[in-house]
Image (cartoon, rainbow, N blue to C red):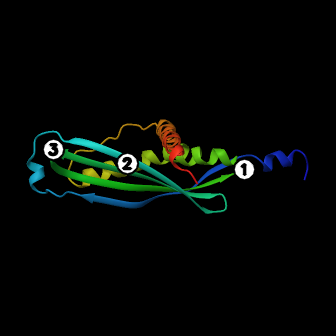
């Protein structure tokens, strides 16, 4: 192998192999009465991400988005999508894999999940839900801080 070819072989690789909807759920528990409501609902959004190695340098990442619309204590709708993707990540330092899985991959998948949520809500007979952009880097950093605090708080009591 020539010197010019060797550095190219070591270049980091990050490719999207496949994006897909792994799971989709829609519930309208109070239909048809909920369609008579004139008050604007409060929409709550929850996000979760997971990543699993499924092959050599292939990761399955799932972004789960749950949107629940309520008026007082009555649920108008609950929609949940598990937007998933297969990502090829190679020649990346081990310490950089987790941020890629927790930040870069969800950033790519979020617009797709957002579209699925909006489409499902429209098909259920409601006005579209437009989810605000999400800063997955901030979410990742907050999770790391919480884990560090929990580890620091738990250290004195974990004596072996």
Q: Is residue 64 left or right of residue 144?
A: left
Mark 2, mark 1: which one is toward the viewer?
1
Residue found 19% across the figure and 46% down from its top = 70
Q: Is residue 10 above or below residue 22?
A: above
Q: Is residue 110 left or right of residue 105?
A: left
Q: Secondary structure at mark 2?
A: helix
Instruction: Give the secondary structure at mark 1.
Output: loop
Label 2 neighbour load within 10 Å: few <14, some 14-19, many 20+: some
Q: Earlier in the sequence, mark 2 or mark 1?
A: 1
Q: Is residue 60 left or right of residue 127?
A: right
- Residue 160 place in picture, x, y as percent: 58, 54
Q: Which residue is mark 2?
A: 115
Give the residue at x 67% y 62%.
Answer: 56
Identify residue for label 3: 71
Q: Position of residue 87 (x, y in %)?
A: 58, 54
Task: In the displayed orientation, state which residue is furthest to the bottom.
Answer: 55
What is the spatial separation of the Cα atoms under label 1 and label 3, in whole angstroms? 50 Å
- Residue 91 is tagged as 1
């Amino acid at each position: 192998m020539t010197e010019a070819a060797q550095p190219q072989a070591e270049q980091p690789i990050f490719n999207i192999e496949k994006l897909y909807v792994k799971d989709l759920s829609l519930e309208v528990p109070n239909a048809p009465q909920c369609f008579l409501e004139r008050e604007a609902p409060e929409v709550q959004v929850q996000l979760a991400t997971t990543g699993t190695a499924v092959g050599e340098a292939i990761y399955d990442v799932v972004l789960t988005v749950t949107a629940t619309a309520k008026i007082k204590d009555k649920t108008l709708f609950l929609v949940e999508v598990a937007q998933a993707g297969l990502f090829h990540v190679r020649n990346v330092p081990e310490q950089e894999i987790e941020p890629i899985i927790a930040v870069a991959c969800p950033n790519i998948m979020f617009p797709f999940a957002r579209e699925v949520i909006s489409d499902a809500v429209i098909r259920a007979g409601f006005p579209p839900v437009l989810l605000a952009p999400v800063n997955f880097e901030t979410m990742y950093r907050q999770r790391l801080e919480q884990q560090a605090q929990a580890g620091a708080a738990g250290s004195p009591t974990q004596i072996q």
